[in-house]
Amino acid sequence: MMRIYFDSCALNRQTDTPSQHRVRLEAEAVDRIFRLVWKGRLEWIASLANEIELRRNPDEMRRSDGLKLLSFASNLVEPDIATRVRSAELERSGYGAEKIGTGGRYGRPFFLNV
């Protein structure tokens, strides 16, 4: 079964105001992919980074909705040592460490960035 990873932006896209055409199209795309997850055609792999980012959302309702949605992921994986080391390297060079996907024993999931 194909695995998929949604970054926190994709998870929050469902609660964005669809005033812009692009935002509406992205929300529809995420919704269609979620339908494949619910039907069992895709396996949703989430990471500890998702939870950290969602908890940082200052909007209480969006934070709550995102965390509820996250609870439906098939697996919530924590980064392995190699990923933690690479995250630290990227953070030192200016990238946000929580944006790093996880690999580890589950293999590399697919990424969806919107």
Image (cartoon, helix red, strand yellow):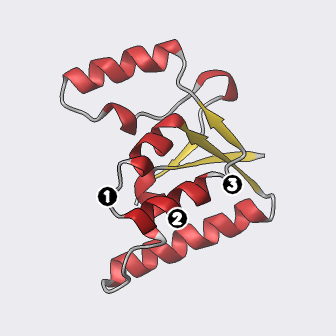
Callout 3: SS: loop
The local crowd at label 3, few if under 14, some if 14 to 19, many if 20 or more residues have their Cα within 10 Å, is some
Q: Amino acid at mark 2?
A: Asp
Q: CA distance from mark 3 to mark 1?
A: 22 Å
**Residue 8's spot in the image, x, y percent?**
44, 52
Q: CA distance from mark 2 to mark 3?
A: 12 Å
Depicted 2 relative to depicted 34: above or below: above
* Residue topped by disc 2: 65
Q: CA distance from mark 1 to mark 2?
A: 12 Å
Q: Amino acid at mark 1?
A: Pro
Q: Is residue 41 left or right of residue 70?
A: right
Q: Is residue 12 left or right of residue 89?
A: right
What residue lies at 49% left-to-right and 43% top-to-bottom?
51
Q: Is residue 4 left or right of residue 113?
A: right
Q: Earlier in the sequence, mark 2 or mark 3?
A: 2
The local crowd at label 2, few if under 14, some if 14 to 19, many if 20 or more residues have their Cα within 10 Å, is some
Callout 2: SS: helix
**Residue 3's spot in the image, x, y percent?**
68, 45
**Residue 13's spot in the image, x, y percent?**
43, 68
Circles 1 and 2 in contact, beta carbons < 8 Å = no
* Residue topped by disc 1: 58
What residue lies at 44% left-to-right and 68% top-to-bottom?
61
Q: Do we see residue 113 in this rendering?
A: no
Q: Quadrant of residue 96?
A: top left
Q: Earlier in the sequence, mark 3 or mark 1?
A: 1
Image quadrant where one finds the C terminus: bottom left
What residue lies at 53% left-to-right and 71% top-to-bottom?
29
* Residue topped by disc 3: 72
Name the front one of labels 3 and 1. Answer: 1
